[in-house]
Amino acid sequence: MLRPIRTALLLAAILPAVARAQYGLDEPQPAGFEVEVDVAGASVDLETFREGLAPYGTWVDVPGYGTVWRPNVAADWRPYHYGRWVWTDEGWLWVSDEPWGWGPYHYGRWGWDTSSGWFWVPGYQWAPAWVSWRFSAGAVGWAPIAPGFSVYTGSYPWFYPAWTFMPCGYFAGYPVHHHAYPISHYPAHYRQTAPAPPRAAPYGARSPAWGGPAPGFVAQHTGRAVTPAPVRPVSSPAQLGQPGRGDAISVFRPERVGTGPARAGAAAAGRSAAASALPGRFAQRSGSIPDA
């Protein structure tokens, strides 16, 4: 059952000052802002992910992060790249082409280091996607939220292997890997787009509860209506590939059992150990941050 959550989050409480300065996050920020989101709980635990993801990668222990999962992917792979974005009543839902996408794209966080590349840190709160957004009339961009960062962060680090940008005209419903801009264009798109955290209002259009471009903005710049697709819950990941009814999107989304209301701020912040470990790892390939 969905529960409305009202919370005030401070960026300063999520990242140490050194990390914010290292990533260029010390631009003027609001002292605090309130966000209303509907959050569904989850009864998933580590064993749920261990069993479901084992055929597609390796479980290892990484200092500062604990038990993490490394997918069996190509060297140039990045999260949230093989699939499409679909508008639903809960916001922009990532529909993955990858058979394991039911878990790592809707729970937990993605991290990266020089020795092993991408790895996924398990989490237990479901979301349509855990990404940071930027957009303009010409491009929509996103990057997976790393451990220690919040979905409410308005200015996310420039770490080029994490970001994906695609034309606004192909954003809704089109396969990303077919339409994404070349990675060499990403610095320019980063500079030319505005951040879109939840409930922000870049270009005068209020972002959805989980962030991203407003559906009306996308419709205006594509010339196509953007209407919410129905979501069909299924009882196991194995049912995700089965035919649905009409244009319904199948989602494996376990309910929380025996716990109180989710606290979005705590879940979004991630592990404190990961927050302190993140900057040193990401900085190794971040390069300079484009001028905002």
Image (cartoon, rainbow, N blue to C red):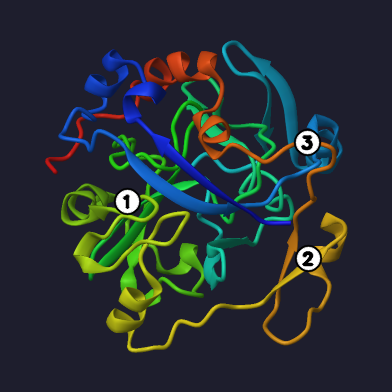
Residue 85 seen by the camera: yes
Please give the residue where the numbered disc 1 appears in the rendered image.
183
Residue 123 location (% of width, % of height): 66, 34
Lower position in the chain sequence, tag 3 or tag 1: 1
Please identify the quarter of the rendering in which residue 205 is found: bottom left
Q: Nearer the viewer, mark 3 or mark 1?
A: 3
Mark 2, Cα crowd under 10 Å, few <14 / some 14-19 / many 20+, is some
Q: Which residue occupies the foreground of this view, 134 or 54?
A: 134
Give the structural element (helix, strand or loop) at label 3: loop
31 vs 50, left or right, is: left
Residue 78 seen by the camera: no
Identify the residue at horizontal 52%, vertical 30% (top origin).
111
Q: Quadrant of the C terminus?
A: top left
Please give the residue where the numbered disc 2 appears in the rendered image.
233
Amino acid of disc 2: Pro
Please identify the quarter of the rendering in which residue 48 is found: top right
Gap in angstroms between the C-alphas marked 3 and 1: 43 Å
